[in-house]
Amino acid sequence: MRVACVVDGFNLYRSLKDAIEDGASPSIKWLDIIKVCQSRLKFFGPDACLGLVTFCTATVGPPQSIRASNQKCYLNVLKAHGVVVPVFQNNGIAALWSVCVEHDCICAPA
């Protein structure tokens, strides 16, 4: 069974930021999302394999800001490792559905 993994970038970022405030290393922001998704496959049974990994996000800060530059760098790393990175403006569910259809993963809009 192919399993699609969809990551909510905003909530992941907030959680990692909280972890850093609680003493975790700032390098945790460079989390290997593919490895995290792979580690969850065991919950889907022995035949589960990782299909599409999607990191959903929206742009941060003004385009020339340090935050935007850091985000762009991280998103480029994700893309280089095969993660699909749609950047949403409006209507995230419809946009996510179109990503799933385009990449032939099994999912349905909420």
Image (spheres, grey):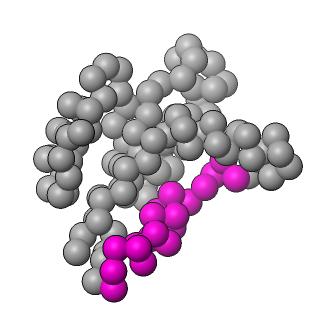
Q: Is residue 8 visible?
A: yes
Using the image as rendered, state which of residue 51 and residue 64 is in the foreground. Answer: 51
Give the left or right position of residue 61, taking residue 53 as reference. right
Question: Looking at the picture, how far across and down is residue 15, in whole percent?
Answer: 64, 43
Kindly tell me whether residue 73 is visible in this rendering: no
Where residue 106 sits: x, y (%)?
A: 18, 58
- Specify the quadrant of the image occupied by residue 92: top left
Q: Quadrant of the C terminus?
A: top left
Tell me which secondary structure the magenta stretch mostly adopts: helix
Q: Percent position (x, y) of residue 46?
A: 33, 85
Above or below 69: residue 25: below
Magenta stretch encompasses residue 38: yes
Q: Residue at x 28, y 83 (%)?
A: 47
Question: Residue placed at 46% from the left, 69% from the top?
Answer: 40
Query: Does residue 9 lie above or below 24 as drawn?
Result: above
Q: Residue furthest right?
A: 23
Residue displayed at 75% across by 47% down:
19
9 vs 1, left or right, is: right
> Furthest-bottom residue in view?
46
x and y percentages locating residue 10 in the rendered image:
52, 34
Q: Is 84 situated left or right of 94 in this image? A: right
Q: Is residue 16 above or below residue 57?
A: below
Q: Is 36 left, or right, of 5 in this rendering?
A: right
Q: Quadrant of residue 58?
A: top left
Magenta highlight on residue 30: yes
Residue 80 versus residue 13: which sits nearer the camera? 13
Between 103 and 12, the residue placed more toward the observer is 12
Q: Residue at x 54, y 23 (%)?
A: 60
Image height check: is 9 above or below 79?
Answer: above
How many numbered circles are shown?
Answer: 0
Range of magenta residues: 28-46
Query: On the rendered image, what quadrant is the N terminus found in?
Result: bottom left
